[in-house]
Image: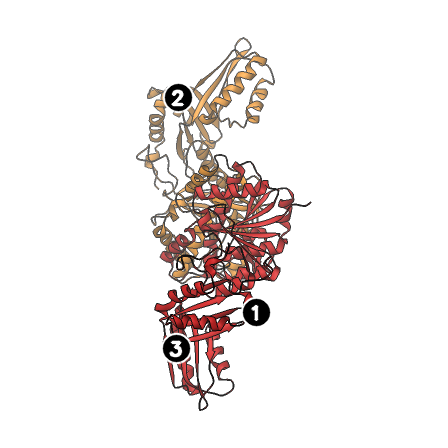
Chain colours: A red, B orange
């Protein structure tokens, strides 16, 4: 039987110092000795990237993005060479590669490049020679032959894309948390670790504030149907497997709840109810690269309506400016905003076949005297905007209501 | 008139921190504003390379050389990106490249690779676009597509090879000394900075203990006839130009003196005076990679002779072991050695046309009661081995005797 191909990814906190790198080497060696063929993707050591950013900011407060990529890509190159040495010490063969070297081909958008393809010939050759292949995450080479980086969470993406290109059996993401939880355990103390979660649920949770996995990486894993195991690099506990379909016969209605306090609400008051107005507004916001999340428009009265939407707080002032500029031409009366909001969401594929979940959400919030300001639903999620000081409490009562504290993990 | 192409090289101490990098950027910009087309080769910042070596030694005391090259090559990549940013801040266009990126092709000997060729197409293209090109020194890409480093002094070599490949008008080596001196100023307080020195003299001085320029870099400069300017990166003083022929009509007889205390002397006593013995001995030493410097054999008495040679102290024990093993078969009576020696040398192309230089050397040493243990001469140099505690004094009296303290620099 041919051996399994597994891609493992270790984040910055997992390779933060010599001791951590030794720990990762032990894990990699253990997995290799079980007969697996391994490709290991590593991030830069701990705070290396931040230190390089600080160094560059001293020299040039607005450095060229191309040179930023040259600079920060050294971080992963360092950690992957050191990990190779640590594996050699344990008697196994290993070889490290930079992203450009191994053929992670990206577009030309420096500091936020997209992977176009991965040339796997060299990796496959080394795997055939029974070597553990170590690859610098977060980086690639552009079609213009420049060093590029993939932006936030890029190493997860490197790992998943690598797994997809190699047709790997599994992609294991090692991190400083033990897996995906029914809620953020720092807020909900009886949050339970999930054994399985579907790609769709993970994507919904990530979009709604869960911070374990980057959306981009999960999207690629879903597209190529590569199961993702999220585990701690500091203990041997089973983590969470993110996959297309969980092995359960019947899914729970709600898999998890999420909270975000990073958004703000903008409301355009008395918008003329004519075709094309909404398109015009959101086209302009998109042009300004403002990432709009929830959009709510209700039925109109006297041919006037209100449109509300949420944006990341960091984009709020730009969103207000853009909205006010448009308002004059369109005849919108007023643009108001509120930064003191929180968004709570419940997510679960089981909702598809269960009715009454929304009603249950609204009831429990009402029972707890939490006022709902905006509602938005998708096929597998329900999100409510509430006042910021109610956010954490809303999360807790929803978690309890859907008995997530009773899940067997 | 087409503008001059100049290659500048800044060593580790010249880019040790943010302030130093800013200083280098100012110099580069000044030179570019004079209309020169510039390629700037940089070393890693200050102690970066040593820090990386220390980190690796904690993980693996005998790391793979391939992975060492992966690791340490990050140092120059960092400094060249930062220098590009510092130049951008001053409003000029600049672009940085790693050695592999720019096509510095080497053989496959990791940590001590030799440059085979440099593919200059990309550099020429960027120069044409009026950009200052910054290249990471000390590194390249092997014919097996691996990252390689060039070993000690490799950045000087990168710069000179780059200048040769581009057909540059000049290669400027910026360092922490002001140029080439008639003697080491730390020993001879009235040593004078030379305005010019020939390649041959520089090579002789370097081989005999002067530590400013690496021999490999000077050899390449000589081969391609690229004038080398050695200057301080910390002041505006004129440095020394190393070139094929100085502009002087008549050369001084002696250009400089050098001292090395890093060698030891081995003497094979009572060697049978038969053909092939010397060849056999030095072949064996070469096979053991022992770098033999001076070799002295005198006329024989009763068909027996003594052969003495010097080796770096670090190779002494290997040299003794090899010599003693051979002695038995050949019938050599005894192998003795002396670590307490120093070698003083006088160097100058003017010797070619002047007689009496050797006699003058021996006289001044004798007058100062310094005993000569070995003598070796080349066309442009004379070296004497003396007892170690006389070395510095020998250097000073020779410097004075040849009036090097009176040279107009």
Residue linked to disc 2: B340
SS type, badge 2 = loop
Q: Classify mark 3: residues with Cα within 10 Å, few (<14), some (14-19) or many (20+).
A: few
Count of residue discs: 3
Quarter of the image for the C terminus of chain B: give it. Answer: top left
Q: Is residue B208 above or below residue A226?
A: above
Q: Are the residues under badges 1 and 2 in a single subunit?
A: no
Residue linked to disc 3: A321
Q: Are the residues under badges 1 and 3 in a single subunit?
A: yes
x then y, percent, for residue A286: 48, 74
Mark 1 against mark 3, which lies toward the viewer? 1
Dot label at residue B236: none
Is there CB contact under 8 Å for labels 1 and 2? no
The chain letter under disc 2 is B
The chain letter under disc 3 is A
Q: Nearer the viewer, residue A99 or A16?
A: A16
Residue A67 shows in the view? no
SS type, badge 1 = helix
Dot label at residue A352: 1
Residue B229 shows in the view? yes
């Amino acid at each position: 039987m041919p051996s399994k191909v597994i891609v493992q990814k270790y984040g910055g906190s997992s390779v933060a110092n010599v001791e951590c790198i030794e720990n990762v080497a032990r894990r990699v060696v253990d997995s290799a000795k079980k007969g697996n063929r391994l490709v290991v993707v590593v991030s830069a050591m701990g705070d290396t990237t931040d230190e390089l950013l600080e160094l560059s900011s001293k020299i040039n407060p607005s450095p060229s993005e191309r040179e930023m990529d040259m600079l920060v890509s050294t971080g992963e190159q360092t950690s992957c060479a050191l990990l190779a040495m640590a594996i050699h010490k344990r008697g196994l063969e290993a070889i490290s590669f930079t992203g450009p070297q191994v053929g992670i081909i990206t577009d030309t958008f420096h500091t936020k490049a997209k992977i176009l393809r991965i040339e796997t010939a060299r990796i496959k050759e080394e795997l055939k020679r029974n070597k553990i292949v170590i690859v610098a995450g977060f980086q690639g080479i552009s079609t213009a032959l420049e060093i590029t980086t993939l932006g936030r969470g890029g190493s997860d993406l490197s790992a998943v894309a690598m797994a997809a290109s190699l047709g790997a059996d599994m992609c294991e993401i090692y991190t400083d948390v033990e897996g995906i939880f029914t809620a953020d355990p720092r807020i909900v103390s009886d949050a339970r670790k999930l054994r399985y979660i579907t790609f769709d649920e993970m994507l919904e949770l990530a979009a709604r504030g869960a911070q374990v996995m980057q959306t981009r990486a999960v999207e690629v894993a879903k597209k190529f149907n590569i199961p993702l195991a999220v585990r701690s690099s500091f203990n041997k506990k089973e983590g969470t497997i993110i996959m297309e379909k969980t092995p359960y016969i019947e899914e729970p209605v709600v898999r998890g709840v999420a909270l975000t306090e990073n958004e703000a609400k903008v409301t355009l008051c008395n918008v003329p109810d004519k075709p094309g107005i909404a398109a015009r507004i959101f086209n302009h916001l998109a042009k300004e690269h403002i990432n709009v999340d929830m959009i709510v428009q209700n039925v109109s009265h006297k041919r006037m309506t209100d449109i509300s939407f949420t944006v990341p707080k960091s984009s709020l002032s730009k969103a207000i400016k853009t909205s006010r500029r448009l308002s004059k031409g369109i005849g919108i009366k007023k643009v108001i905003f509120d930064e003191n909001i929180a968004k709570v969401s419940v997510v679960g594929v089981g909702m598809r076949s269960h009715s009454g979940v929304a009603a249950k959400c609204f009831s429990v919030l009402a029972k707890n005297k939490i006022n709902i300001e905006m509602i938005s639903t998708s096929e597998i999620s329900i999100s409510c905007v509430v006042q910021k000081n109610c956010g954490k409490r809303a999360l807790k009562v929803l978690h309890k209501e859907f008995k997530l504290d009773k899940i067997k993990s």
